[in-house]
Image (cartoon, coloured by chain):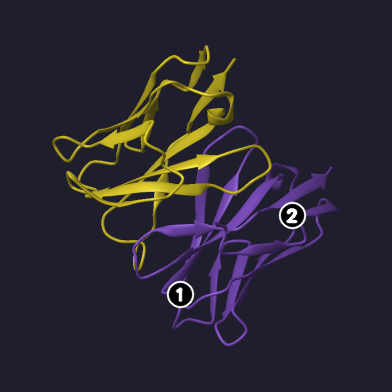
Amino acid sequence: SQQGEEDPQALSIQEGENATMNCSYKTSINNLQWYRQNSGRGLVHLILIRSNEREKHSGRLRVTLDTSKKSSSLLITASRAADTASYFCATGLGTDKLIFGTGTRLQVFP
Amino acid sequence: DTGVSQDPRHKITKRGQNVTFRCDPISEHNRLYWYRQTLGQGPEFLTYFQNEAQLEKSRLLSDRFSAERPKGSFSTLEIQRTEQGDSAMYLCASSPAGASGNTIYFGEGSWLTVV
């Protein structure tokens, strides 16, 4: 079963704009990880944020985590056509596995 | 390349046949995971190993599915008597420890089409 729900399910923007994706989950977590998946390919790890952290940055990526609301957001700034992909959040539980959300499909137009 | 390696990348098989997928994790990663992903959905957990021990199996893993990691290095996922509903991408991943503290790295996946 899916743990997380990403919102929106699909997002279309122009190059240079920012893209924000949200993830909500249901149970307590140890960490939350964001992944990118290009069509037909495997998952590429983007960022891991632990439950005691509130914000992390990596290049053009900014992730926030609000454990009181059981939600996280991924912001991609100054988007590029190469950012076109599906983005998934995945929560790490005490059982040492990741449970994935349903994903956000991002389309960035040149 | 020292990433997670999966083989074959694509497999087309007739219903009722058996198929086997192989995964070579990142060296020295003692955790190995199998996931399944269908079109438009997120990956679903199937099973995971710590070294050679299979620690958890999802209810998704029917009796027709078996996974092994005999020497704590590479792993195989076998599907017996394939059904059309088994058509999916099978993803392997590895990590140096549990998901509670470490990044899990995925391979490129193995696509299965059952005709």
The residue depicted at 50 percent of the width and 20 percent of the height is B10
- Chain B drawing hue: yellow
Mark count: 2
Q: Secondary structure at mark 1?
A: loop
Quarter placement of the C terminus of chain A: top right
Is A64 left or right of A15, judged from the image as shown?
left
Say which residue label 1 marks: A29
Residue at 45 percent of width and 79 percent of height? A51
Q: What residue sits right under mark 2 in the picture? A: A79
- Indicate the colour of chain A: purple
Asked if residue A22 lies left or right of residue B31, the reply is right
Quarter-of-image position of residue A104: bottom right
Marks 2 and 1: which is nearer the front?
Answer: 1
> Which chain is disc 2 placed on?
A
Residue in the foreground of this view, choosing between B52 and B101: B52
> Can the viewer see residue A50 in this picture?
yes
Asked if the residue under mark 1 is in contact with the one under mark 2, i.e. CB atoms within 8 Å, the reply is no
Q: Position of residue A48 (x, y in %)?
A: 46, 65
A94 left or right, relative to A26: left
* Amino acid type, callout 2: Ser
Residue B5 occupies which quadrant of the picture? top left
Q: Which quadrant of the rendered structure holds the N terminus of chain A?
A: bottom right
Chain letter for mark 1? A
Q: In the rendered view, does B27 fall on the left or right side of B92?
A: left
Rendered position, A31 above or below A18: below
* Residue B2 percent coordinates (x, y): 32, 36
Residue B57 percent coordinates (x, y): 35, 49
